[in-house]
Amino acid sequence: MTNLTHLTLAEALKGLENKDFTSVEITQAHLDAMESMRHLNAYVIETPEIALAQAKASDDRRAKGNAGPLDGAPISVKDVFCTKEVQTTASSHILEGFIPKYESTVTQNIFNDGVVMLGKTNMDEFAMGASTTTSYFGNTINPWKNKSDPGKDLVPGGSSGGSAASVAARMALGSLGSDTNGSIRQPSSFCGITGIKPTYGRCSRWGIVAFASSLDQAGVFGRTVEDCALLLKSVCGHDPKDSTSAKIDVPDWPKLLSSNQGVKGLRIGIPKEFRVDGMPDEIEKIWQQGIDWLKDEGAEIVDISLPHSTYSVPAYYIIAPAEASSNLARYDGVRYGLREDGEDLIETYEKTRAAGFGDEVKRRIMIGTYVLSAGYYDAYYIKAQKIRRLIVEDFQKAFEKCDALLAPTSPSVAFPIGEKLDDPVKMYLEDVFTSPASLAGLPGMSVPAGLNADGLPLGLQIIGRQWDEEMVLRVGAAVEKAANFSAIPEMVDTKLAA
Ligand code: GLN
């Protein structure tokens, strides 16, 4: 039998439908892969009992002809989503032992469609980071190795690094993640997989551990654009429990994608401000390669300008910490997870928060509290909000001239674990290409486009108009076809062949 963990989600669904194998079989194959790849620390918790029970139930449904659109497919879930009766920590010590009594809307949506949950994946604490090194549960290791320096473990990107590693290492057919500013796109790029963040408001934030509410958005990882379309359709939709989720129909993206329209006649915008100083040659080259591919397929390439995008990283690092400082005020040692008792209530708060939050989270709470303080609110927070508005308007103008944007996903490939940790600003600059779309609430996707000279994956980013995920997927499919990316991390092959 073909190795079941190497199938795409679409292929696995076909195999299940044709009764080539059962959900229990494909689920067990993934549980075995998880065991053999445990050293990557992609999962915070594995949930084999739940997975096998869900798989069995799925096989029963299928036998009765009641299978849902994703029935029996095993996937992983970022530990930022509250899962009923399953510990949910957002990789923070402060939430250790927190067992939600409810299910997040997006996980409920995929379960309603028949998905099997393999476990909860590792992430940067409270989704703050770009490397999955701020997790209380230790870093995740990227399954890819730098050929020139194979002894060094690399980061999988972040914050959804566990999700991306789980999909790249064939420990899940796909994954649910969240993207506040790049946390799906950048790890997809680092791990050689595909990931899409839909328009802000496309799916419910209900039951997602909040970081920056005006930016947080659920999204999905897959090994192909088609797999992303399948998962995305399942997670999206209006939810009366989240007033920021939009009452707007969810298109049948997999079907639209299967009509294979190509990019002929489309106008693809190239934002000139993304040609940042010091951009590595390999990033510049892959971007040019992407432009050439789309041109060869008949797209028209247009130069566009997003003049305020150069301020998007500083604006984001004011707005996101401001919202985080408010959202994280709820962790007081009384209601969730960890509690460190003090002499009185105030001391209990202080001791709990001192012990429960890691350094990066504390840094952001302090920055956020500062920029919201009476004396500095106008100078920082209000100014950042004004910049955000200007960035939204820049995109609106750009989209008069083009249908989608093509850009690099990240200014670097996967870097060694520990690098950039002593300099938060260096880490924040990882977000240079992802923050404009996040601040504007636009859909964005990363598609693997090739390997660099050291054998590490490089991603290209496609950004679309508000609600136009269809265009993002369509352009993404064209990049995917041209790139024909089929590389697999070496360790996956050798381990599974053994
Ligand atoms: N790099 C971003 C940050 O550190 C990632 C945020 C996200 O998308 N969760 O805030």
Image: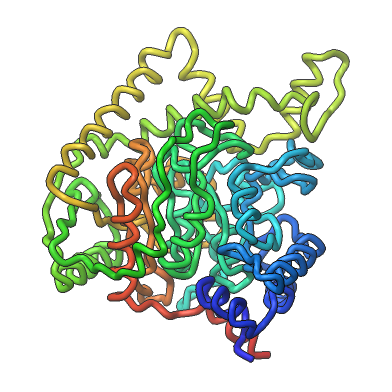
Q: Residue 252's image quarter?
A: bottom left
Which residue reaches farthest front?
A: 64
Residue placed most toward the observer, 360 or 119 = 119
- Residue 474 screen position, x and y as percent: 30, 62
Q: Residue 332's image quarter?
A: top right
**Point 16% across, 67% down: residue:** 264
**On the picture, is 346 further left or further right than 249?**
right
- Residue 119 screen position, x and y as percent: 71, 59
| Number of marks in picture | 0
Q: Is residue 495 visible?
A: no
**Point 55% across, 29% down: residue:** 324
Q: Is residue 51 above or below residue 218?
A: below
Q: Residue 73's image quarter?
A: bottom right
**How is colour applied across the structure in the image?**
rainbow
Q: Is residue 312 above or below residue 226?
A: above
- Residue 317 screen position, x and y as percent: 43, 33
Q: Is residue 68 visible?
A: yes
**Point 76% across, 65% down: residue:** 57
- Residue 491 screen position, x and y as percent: 59, 80
**Point 48% across, 53% down: residue:** 184
Q: Is residue 205 above or below residue 139?
A: above
Residue placed most toward the observer, 284 or 237 = 237
Quarter of the image where the N terminus is located: bottom right
**On the picture, is 19 further left or further right than 470?**
right
Residue placed most toward the observer, 333 or 23 = 23
**On the picture, is 237 further left or further right than 26?**
left
Which residue reaches farthest top?
A: 374
Quarter of the image where the C terminus is located: bottom right
